[in-house]
Amino acid sequence: MFTLARSCARLIYFTLSEMGRMGIFLATSLLQIVVPPLQVTQLLRRIDFIGARSLLLIIFTGAFTGMVVAFQGYTALRRFGGEAFLGPGVGLSLIRELGPVLSALMITGRAGSALTAELGIMRITEQIDALEVMALNPIRYLVVPILVATLITFPLLNAVFVVVGIYGGYLVGVELLGVSAGSYFSQMSSAVTSADVWGGLYKSLSFGLIVAWVCCFKGFYAARGAEGVSHATTQAVVMCSVLILVWDYFLTSIL
Amino acid sequence: MIQFRNLHKSFGTQRVLAGMNLEIPERSIFVVIGRSGAGKSCLLKLLIGLLHPEAGEIQVNGVDVCSLRGRTLNDMRSRFGMLFQGGALFDSLSVYDNVAFPLREKTRFSESTIRRKVHERLAQVGLSGIDEKFPAELSGGMRKRVALARALVSEPEILLFDEPTTGLDPIRVNAIHQLIRDLHKKLRFTAIIVSHEIPEIFSIATHVAMLHDGTIIATGTADEIQASPNPVIQQFIHGRSEGPIEAN
């Protein structure tokens, strides 16, 4: 009984201290964004890695997500004779929900895990220590470019995901299942409001912040050699995925 | 002058330094020897502010390093260079960019001045003509020499060497030792070297200290240390498995 209580107390202590460290890490990183000079070369490198190199993946997943949503939507709407509302169904689900969430999850898997591993390897090979010895702030040099790059690339990739998804839905709904092209787009444009678009944008921005924050934190404080880096990478991907879904629920309930 | 006073450091339940005292004269080549895990690398990291002690102080020319934070700590670090055990070269940068890195980030030198300084340092470590190579394309010895060039390029007053020759063949070990001695003669920095290369490292040391059980058990010249009657020192420098130090 005593051992169980002690284990619980240790777990609570560890969780709270980890949350505290993560909070301090985020606050420090956000403060460092406004400290000049911005590492432009590093920023462009990160935008290329997180954004440009994820483009094909986002196009591919966006297209198939739109196609599946159109198929499922058409099957459900046909029961009530509402096939004309396929456009709004596809558009709203992609803009408000699927675009931000799925694109964030895909980027987490492709780029977030790699960023954690890269920072983790820099930690265990003392490259981060070397920056500190050179009197350079490793958070400003390594983390800030990633943070800024995710804030730039996540909304853009989300937009690509949504546009490609809408055309994927068009392909299935209009070209394959015979919904009128006019009603697909006209119903969509009348149903989707700017609030929906802004909502999707806010979501993708906050997901970008979550991915940069968690992946950088886990990599930055990786320890215990290769096993530690592997552990940090797994933890980062799992934590990002869960946080994205939980945070999505809260945002959906207030936006 | 660098002074460690009554320094204590632990990692969890493992006590590494227990009231350690040490004085390192300016412009010396000061070698710290001791068993693996004795706290030698920890000593260097405490000195440069990468780790913080539980108690005690470290003074560099009268300034307590442990009390420094932020800009004052960075100002102090600007006087140091460090050669890490694995080199700690940045994987994403070429050899040239690695060596130029501290100058680009911390000085306002023109690119032509930086180029001249980088090539000068690379020539001093015997690595001219490999500017475009990346760390992954270099041998262990070359990586250490590039790291040495990077540590030297900002002309530090104090240079820390964390096992600079670990994993190298005997010829490269002697070449690196020779290089440290030659550069020390030219640049007159204070060198603090943590090493296991015994007795080779004694040939370049002006002072030697042995760290054992969290404290410095002897300091002196290389000859004095080698002639020490202390059985712990004799067992360690002769690599005997039997004696007061347990092999496991």
Image (cartoon, rainbow, N blue to C red):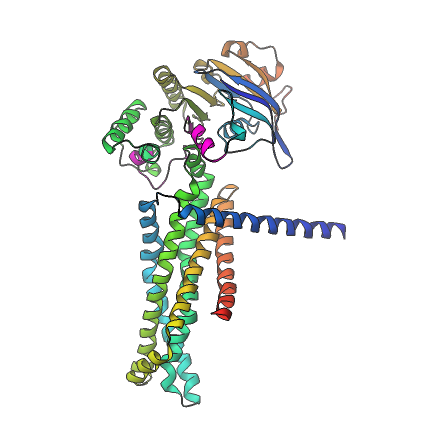
Question: Looking at the picture, does residue B233 appear above or below residue A224?
Answer: above
Q: Quadrant of residue A84?
A: bottom left
Residue A193 image position (x, y, % from top left): 37, 75
Residue B140 seen from this side = yes
Which residue lies most toward the left here? B112
In the image, is residue B81 part of the stretch drawn in magenta?
Answer: yes
Does the magenta portion include B66? no
- Bounds of the magenta span? B69-98
Q: Position of residue A158 (x, y in %)?
A: 37, 64
From the viewer's perspective, is B213 left or right of B99? right
Residue at position x 48%, y 56% from top?
A237
Name which residue lies at 34% across and 49% down.
Answer: A43
Residue occupying image coordinates x 36% and y 53%: A149
Give above or below for B114 relative to A149.
Answer: above
Q: Position of residue B214 (x, y in %)?
A: 61, 25
Q: Residue at x 35, y 16 (%)?
A: B182
Instruction: Pick the residue in front: B62 or B214.
Output: B62
The residue lying toward the viewer, choosing from A185 and B124, is: A185
Return the x and y of residue B230 as percentages of the image width and height: 61, 13
**Count of number-bearing discs:** 0
Q: Nearer the viewer, residue A158 or B41?
A: A158
Specify whether residue A218 is in view.
Answer: no
Measured along the vertical axis of the image, is residue B40 above or below residue A172? Answer: above
* Rendered position, A77 above or below A102: below
Taking the view exactly as shown, the residue that stands out farthest to the right is A1
